[in-house]
Image (cartoon, helix red, strand yellow):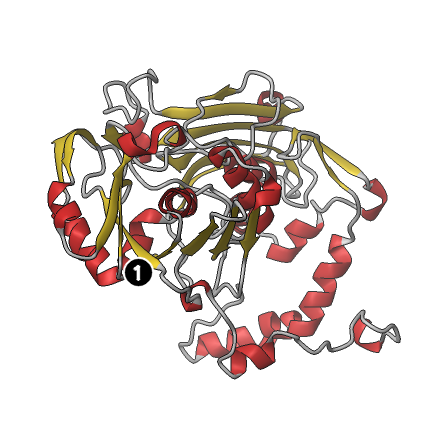
Amino acid sequence: VLARSSTRFLGAPQRRNEDPALLTGKAQFVGDVRLEGMWHAALVRSPYASARIKGIDVSAARERPGVVAVFTAAELGDVCQPVPLVVPPPPIKGLVFNKRTQTPLAKGRVRHVGEPVALVVAESRYAAEDAAGDVTVEYDELPVVTDLEKAIQVGSPLVYDDVSSNVAAKAIQTKGDYASAARSAHKIIKRRIRYEHGMAHPMETRGVVAQWDEKAGRLTVWAATQAPTSLRGALAGVLGMSEGQIRVVAPFVGGGFGAKLLYYYPEELLIPWAARKLKGAVKWIEDRGEHFVAAAQERGQIHDVEMALTEDGAILGIKDVFLHDNGAFNPYGLTVPLNSQCSVLGNYVVPNYDSTMICVFTNKPLVGPYRGAGRQHGIFVIERMLDIAARELGLDRNEIRRRNYIPPEAFPYNNELIFQDFTQLTYDSGNYERALDTMLEAIGYRKFIEEEQPRLKAEGKHVGIG
């Protein structure tokens, strides 16, 4: 239908305007920024996942030839405060939320491998890296917690001494009466579903270049970021400047995926601060090893879920209790786990829902909204459960979905849960059955199931459809 559209844009091929620069090697990335007299930065990072900092000796680093400056949390002064919460949690009744955001450089304690402890600025990256190796940090190593289930057990090592447990947040959202629905169900299916912790690896790692113009009192920042305007606002607040004094440039970004979203990364605050402090230009480019331990990571989750169904496959209700790996900090509040909690409903009629979300502090880098931002976790749960239900009830996988779709006449459809936008989760429109039928026809589903798959199975070949 779209391909036959006569409009100028809808369904018509569009010429990409970025290709000539990319294909001819003229595209500028943060790593390509070259400024006269520019210095280079390297960071001293914690080798421990949990430890107290007993002392930092930077004297040898400062004496190395080519070194311009070495900074620790003590030199940052008022700038070394916990960064702002990017997204506050919505007003969910009974919500427990322990806000913890990181400081630009660690103060007193480190909570994950790779947390920055000191910043070195030198005439070259080589000199900066060598000087970073000269910095001596005395650590008092502490017990580490990385397992989600063990983290919330009584007696587990605490990521934060001033929090009574490793529960970063807890939110319970319900609709209807699941317990009553379960009592009347023909079948209840229970499963444990794990979604692994991971991270993005863009072609270009993160990077920041900052230049301070002393005469004009202006700061220019080039950053591999997905949110330049928000970064400008954060810098203005942290550095005590007006936004009009700061220009943030986001050139070509070699892959973002959420890892370059707005977290107020320490480096994005430290490099501009150092440029203004030293009255010049400073450049930092993340190396691949740093990216493994310094960039935001993707959420791991464990769902203990049960689904109550009628004999003909209609969903009566779902109960889900899940753990969400928060990492050591939560600048994005509940954005990711809340998306998961709401997305378990999928595009289906679920009259009764009982969901408990528990976010867990662990000694890992912060977890943030990658592609999908937690939605795919919830969707995986509901779709996996429907596949299992179809098998146990002897139904076609598509038929059980068809029987549970929200019908077109039911829109707008209120799911009765609070979403990340602080309002009730309401779907505005949809025709899911038609979309399913169109897809099945396009891939030749019926012919495959009835003819090709049996033939292939007879030949000893196990071929399926995902």
Report the side of 167 relative to 449 (left or right): left
- Tell me what residue is drawn at x 50 percent, y 40 percent: 235
Q: How many numbered dots are placed on residues in this image?
A: 1
Residue furthest to the bottom:
24
- Tell me what residue is drawn at x 53 percent, y 33 percent: 237
When asked about the image quadrant of residue 442, the answer is bottom right
Q: Nearer the viewer, residue 15 or 229?
A: 229
Q: Nearer the viewer, residue 98 or 145?
A: 98
The amino acid beneath tag 1 is Arg
Q: Position of residue 201 (x, y in %)?
A: 39, 60
Q: Is residue 267 visible?
A: yes
Q: Position of residue 173 (x, y in %)?
A: 59, 25
Residue 255 against residue 189 in the figure, above or below: below
Report the side of 465 relative to 154 (left or right): right
Tell me the element at label 1.
Answer: helix
Q: Nearer the viewer, residue 105 or 455?
A: 105
Q: Position of residue 221 (x, y in %)?
A: 49, 53
Residue furthest to the right:
6
Q: Is residue 380 visible?
A: no
Residue 281 against residue 332 in the figure, above or below: below
Residue furthest to the front:
215
Report the side of 308 relative to 153 (left or right): right
Q: Position of residue 444 (x, y in %)?
A: 65, 74
Say few, some or many: other residues with alpha carbon within 10 Å of mark 1 (under 14 / 14 to 19 / 20 or more). some
Quadrant housing the N terminus = bottom right
Q: Which residue is mark 1?
A: 288
